[in-house]
Image: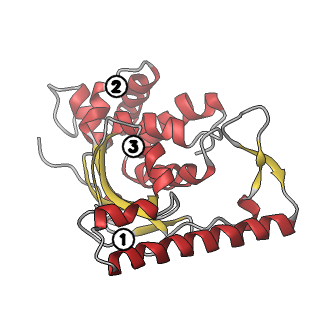
Amino acid sequence: MAHITIPEGDELLDREFKVLDKGFVRLVDYYGSDARIVQAARVSYGKGTTSYRRDRELIRYLLENEHTSPFEQVVFTFHAKMPIFVARQWVRHRTARLNEISGRYSVLPDDYYIPEPERIKTQDTIDHQSSSDEQLPPEIQQKAVSMIEKSSADAYKTYNELLELGVAREVARVVLPLNIYTEWYWQMDLHNLFHFLKLRMDKHAQWEIRQYGLAIGRIVEKIVPISYEAFRDFVLKPRGIEG
């Protein structure tokens, strides 16, 4: 089978989609499209032997009935930049292949995530791991943002001072906070990527990682629109997930 690409996917290559204040998602490469899924499912048929309508029906049938292996034939590679606390949630999806920037080999830049004041909310009393929808008073929100900014700047200043003293990078980095940005190349097939999106686009996911899920979802939809439509109809909508 020939290598399948589509113009809509090629137009997205190497474009940075901004996420949070300093983060991004960038599509590095992709392999396959809806057509690849159809070919894999109808392994004895060639491209062009069926209509768009029948291909759409087949993809929807496969996804609705959890016949997932044909979706593994489509693969995405992303370059992403995110705060470390987001990365530690993200990396729980162990079906990916990734390579992350190393604080042992490189001096990490002073890029750290500072939330907007409206992101500063109270602890949820029911879902004990999440923020509630209750806004704190504006003066408290602004004070919290200022404290986060100062703490981050102080930590990075200490990091630089340790490096200037000759302390090894792998040791100096221990003072850096969880909101400092990291980067990686991240590759995953479409079946497992849909599972990632199902969890990370959900309203119960932490708001910050949800923004990355939404950005990736928009990219994926451009490349496999029929599959994404089925994913939205059979997976996201029944769970009340917007995407």
Q: Nearer the N terminus, badge 1 or badge 3?
A: 3
Q: Nearer the viewer, mark 3 or mark 2?
A: 3
- Residue of label 1: 108
- Residue of label 3: 91
Quadrant location, the C terminus: top right
Quadrant location, the N terminus: top left
Instruction: Check disc 1 and report its element: helix, strand or loop.
Output: loop
Identity of the residue furthest to the left in this view: 1
Q: Amino acid at mark 3?
A: Val
- Residue of label 2: 68
Q: What's the distance in space between the residues labelled 2 and 1, CA to CA?
A: 39 Å
Q: Amino acid at mark 2?
A: Thr
For disc 3, the neighbor class at 10 Å (few under 14, some 14 to 19, many from 20) is few
Residue shown at 83%/64% (left/top)?
Answer: 140
Residue shown at 37%/27% (left/top)?
Answer: 58
Residue nearer the viewer, 99 or 218: 99
Q: Which mark is residue 116?
A: none
Q: Amino acid at mark 1?
A: Leu
Labelled pair 3, 2 in contact (Cβ < 8 Å): no
Q: Residue 32: in sight, yes or no?
A: yes
Q: Position of residue 30 (x, y in %)?
A: 27, 52
Q: Nearer the viewer, mark 2 or mark 1?
A: 1
Residue 9, quarter of the rendered image? bottom left
Q: Position of residue 10 (x, y in %)?
A: 29, 63
Instruction: Check disc 3 and report its element: helix, strand or loop.
Output: loop
Identity of the residue furthest to the bottom in this view: 164
Q: On the rendered structure, is 239 left or right of 200?
A: right
Q: Nearer the N terminus, badge 2 or badge 1?
A: 2
Total marks shown come to 3
Q: Residue 81: in sight, yes or no?
A: no
Q: Nearer the N terminus, badge 3 or badge 2?
A: 2
Q: Position of residue 227 (x, y in %)?
A: 41, 38
